[in-house]
Amino acid sequence: MKTCTKCEYKKDACEFNNSSSTYDGLYSICKSCRSVYRKANKELIANGNKAYAKANKDKIKEYKAKYQQENRLTLNLISKDYNEKNIDSLKEYKKEYYQKNKSTIYLKVKKYKTDNKDYIKDCCARSYQKNKEKNRESRSLYHRLHVEHTKSYNKAYRINNPNLLKVHSVRRRASKLERTPTIMTELDLFVMQEAANLATLREQVMGGKWHVDHVEPLQGKTVSGLHNAFNLAVVPATYNLRKSNRQVSEPWYMEC
């Protein structure tokens, strides 16, 4: 039995909170008296807690880190149990929070991506290598289940992005022939995009088909050129098809 210093009643030990600063390990005030005091002085206690937290930031941070390290498994189990019991309410809370803080979240994510480009790139590369087969099967299954949607999407993409497809086609062919330089400069990428734009513009203004051609063929009989900014030309499709993989100095040009 222990006597409460507030109400002065003798009560069982279970009626007192634990305390590490007293000789018997229990608070001098019982639980009910502490509860009454807290309700009556809610604002005062809150201000006191804020002042203490502000004055002891590093101490609190260190204590929390140490506590989490020592009780990681217990905290994980508590968190997991809570999440399983409150799935619907958590979903609703997250959805509501996202709607209220959409712009803030967007800026935070953007900043994180900008500050951690190399780390994110490395993570994506490792994830891709680790789940290569799984991702391939997943994409294959999706395409089989959504044949019509995939067809309509691909068709719309081809119509809306003719220049990107031309660049991709030329780059893919060059990659297959292993004629792409190990380091692609900004100039190379810019010229490739501009060449594709020019081919599209000439088709609209002059009519006919125009190709982005490699002046020195990527797979020539005597000399093979590279897929870079200095080896591109926008020519009529008929010229490019007749030229095939011959060099400019050969007599194909006179036959066109």
Image (tube, rainbow, N blue to C red):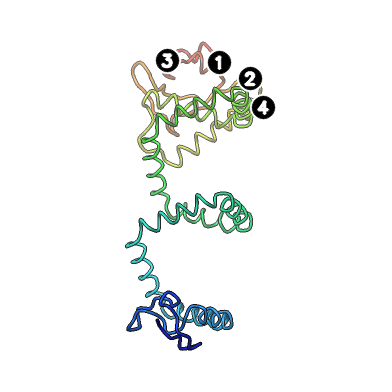
Disc 2 + disc 1, Cβ < 8 Å: yes
Residue 164 coordinates in the image, percent (x, y): 55, 32
Separation of residues labelled 2 and 3 (CA atoms) = 25 Å
Separation of residues labelled 2 and 1 (CA atoms) = 9 Å
Mark 3 or mark 4, which is nearer the start of the sequence?
4
Up-down relation of residue 15 to residue 178 (above or below): below
- Tell me the amino acid under the disc marked 2: Gly
Mark 1 or mark 2, which is nearer the start of the sequence?
2
Instruction: Specify the quadrant that holds the N terminus.
Output: bottom left
Q: What residue is rendered at 41% in x and 44% in y?
A: 121
Disc number for residue 250: 3
Which residue is identified by label 4?
204
Which residue is identified by label 1?
238
- Classed neighbour count for the residue bearing mark 1: other residues with Cα under 10 Å, few (<14), some (14–19), many (≥20): few
Disc number for residue 208: 2
Separation of residues labelled 1 and 3 (CA atoms) = 16 Å
Residue 41 coordinates in the image, percent (x, y): 57, 83
- The residue tagged with tag 1: helix, strand or loop? helix
Mark 3 or mark 1, which is nearer the start of the sequence?
1
Q: What residue is rendered at 36% in x and 40% in y?
A: 126
Foreground label between 4 and 3: 4
Residue 40 coordinates in the image, percent (x, y): 59, 83
Disc 4 + disc 3, Cβ < 8 Å: no
